Image (spheres, coloured by chain):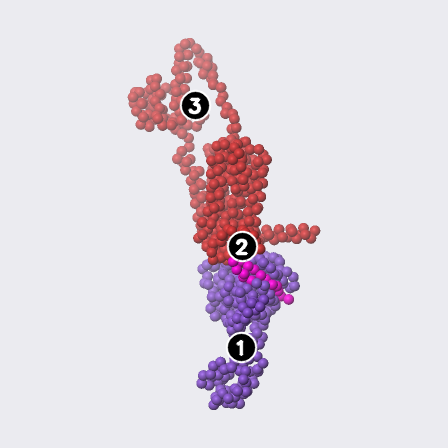
Amino acid sequence: MGLEIHDVAHSFADRRALDGVSFDVAPGVITGLLGPNGAGKTTLLRILLAVVAPDRGEVHFDGRPVDDEDRRRWGYMPQERGLYPGMAAGGQVVHFGRLHGLSRRDATARAHALLEELGLGDRWGERTDKLSGGMQQRLQLAAALVHDPRVIVLDEPFAGLDPVAVASLSETLRERARNGCTVLFSSHQLDLVQDLCEDIAMVDHGRTVLLGNVANLRASSGRRQLRLHVEAPNRDWLLAHPDITVVSDEADDLRLAIPPGIEPLEVLDAARAAGRVVDFGLDLPTLSQLFLSAADRTPGLAGVR
Amino acid sequence: MGTWWRGTALVGTWWRGTALVAERGLVETVRSKSFKILAVLLLLLSVAAVTVPQMIGGGSTTYTLATAGRAPAGMVAVLDAAGRSADFTVRYESRKDGDAVRRTVRDGDATAGLAGGTLYTSARDVGTFPVLVAQAAVALETSRQLSEAGLSPQQISELQSVRPPRQVVVGQADNAGRAAAGFAVGVVLYMALLFAGSAIANTVAMEKSTRISEVLLAVLRPSQMIVGTVVAVGTVTTGLLLVLAAPLAVAVQITDEIGLPAVAGGDLGLAVAWFVLGFMLFAFLYAAAAALVNKVTEVGSAIMPVTITIIVGYLLAIMVVVPDPSSGWSAAASIFPFTAPMAMPIRWASGQVPWWQLVLALALTAATAVLMVSVASAIYRRALVITGRRVRLREVTGRRAAS
């Protein structure tokens, strides 16, 4: 079940931002909405939250159209920071909790727990604009999570974060997903979030160009590379695999492109038969490589349509 | 039944969200340093405006009468009696001759001077005191002559008790007070809106430029954000007006020396109604205008058209309605919603407005204010997500944008 996005389209006065985007977001699975800047990610997330009305298309949750009451129980973190600069950190989180329907007491208790979890426990009374950028980011996250949302939508949550902050935010999101939350976030830094997403929806020019489980997509793509350091006198052992192309060959370091249908382990065995293999590894394509190959194909497809 | 219940629940939810927006705005404003400074300043200003004239005036007025030689006992008795009833005291200065009396008055050391058959007064405005002195002199001389003619003191006293007919001001005596109330609505509305309008516009622009609006729009309807903000700023403005009015009210309670124009309770109620309606109408316009800006610094130019509308409405009220409240233009200005809050209270004071016109103007203004909530909400929703540049009005009002 989870979140289902059906054929969503939206145009601004001068350009088409989304052109029939459809994908599902399963509960318990961290899903990345990926694509370059201007791909339509923010517009899509705004449509999910009803900040923008779509020209057509529908958003369903647990099998029925989403209404305002549902959305009030969602958590949303927009791309740019949306915090009252003059308010105290704690009061801010309490306010958003109450806006999401919590009582003042519950909101206060939850805000305390959440700020503690996010390492802001001692900043309760501090003015928001006195906090550092990283702290404001965590405060923003607290404001989005204070009401224990079942659905969490984050727009570019990793933009501008240092590696430590990226790791800690990733952990927070993983924990929510483990507890059964539906988590969808957008990012243009594809390789940064490669290890976090389980599912992805890649968009480009307002269309989905790649959908599915990250591990499957990477494994099944035809762009696997076998990296070998083999102490062999020559490369004759490669002749048995004419489909394999040599990407690079410097000294004993060899990089081979393994097309679909060929088992990398067989190639490794052949190499071991030819000489001592000192080091080896199978490199799956990165998300940006997957994106580039997927996006390259789309102009052709668009022409056929 | 089900629909009714759901409708009520929706209204309840709407108010809850709106009240939260208002509560937050109110708490933040009241806590802010600038609000505290403004409130204290207004209070000091108001206290000063009430107390300083009293202190300078020193209570009752004192007149000085210079006379050649000692003032006659009869004159002193008559003037002191007049002073007791009209709340003034008289000081008497004796000079040796008429010339000295004349110089005393000329130098401003006496309000009036009496020597021989001459009453000296200065060119300055000294009110009715010289007239009182003249009357007293005439009365004393008359009674002296009557006494010489052989009349008894009893008869003289009877003759002097003859009074001119009592003068009663008729016509619409309360008009001045009512017109003052009408003007007050215009002036207070104008001042309150200049303050509140920029406060509302700044809040909206701040929420837009910090992208708080985007988080809010995911939870609230634009109408809740607008109405909540306007309620918060309206409450603050009312509070400041009360601060401004409190010393005056206290002074009126404890002394009876401050005259307020006598205004009927109905007129006062009407003035409050016009203030509230006018405030809402323009407050929502300010909110809509501010939603068009990209940076907080652009607020000033964005709200200019709204401010100009208020000023034009006020000028129309003064230049068209005051000289001729019964003209067609006056009627139009007092019914057209954007000028009615300023024009109608002034026109109503003239006493020449049919009831139906008042009701029509009130209804039209209220309806326009409600309409403004939805217009402002529409602009707000569309303009808030267009960032990075100033939004043109056309972009957010056209049919295309409505999708």
Front position in the image: B58 or B217: B217
The residue stretch that appears in magenta: A1-18
Q: Name the amino acid type tagged 3.
A: Ala
Q: Where is residue B183 in the image (x, y as percent from the top left)?
A: 49, 36
Chain letter of disc 2 in the image: B
Front position in the image: B16 or B49: B16
The residue identified by callout 1 is: A223
Q: Is residue A226 above or below residue A154?
A: below
- Horizontal side of B112 relative to B391 (left or right) equals left
Q: Where is residue A150 in the image (x, y as percent from the top left)?
A: 60, 64
Query: Chain A rendered in what hue?
Result: purple
Q: Quick check: can you spot residue A2?
A: yes
Chain appearing in red on the rendered image: B
Q: Does residue A15 belong to the magenta stretch?
A: yes
Question: Looking at the image, which residue is at 58% across and 57% down?
Answer: A53
Residue farthest toward the top in the current orientation of the protein? B150
Question: Looking at the image, which residue is at 54% across and 51% down?
Answer: B397
Mark 3 or mark 1, whichever is nearer to me: 1
Numbered disc 2: secondary structure: helix
Quarter that holds the C terminus of chain B? bottom right
Q: Is residue B27 above or below residue B310?
A: below
Mark 1 or mark 2, whichever is nearer to me: 1
Q: Position of residue B147 (x, y in %)?
A: 41, 12
Q: Are marks 3 and 2 in one subunit?
A: yes
Mark 3 or 2, nearer chain start? 3
Mark 3 and mark 1: Cα distance apart in space = 116 Å
Question: Looking at the image, which residue is at 40% across and 33% down?
Answer: B57
The residue identified by callout 2 is: B382
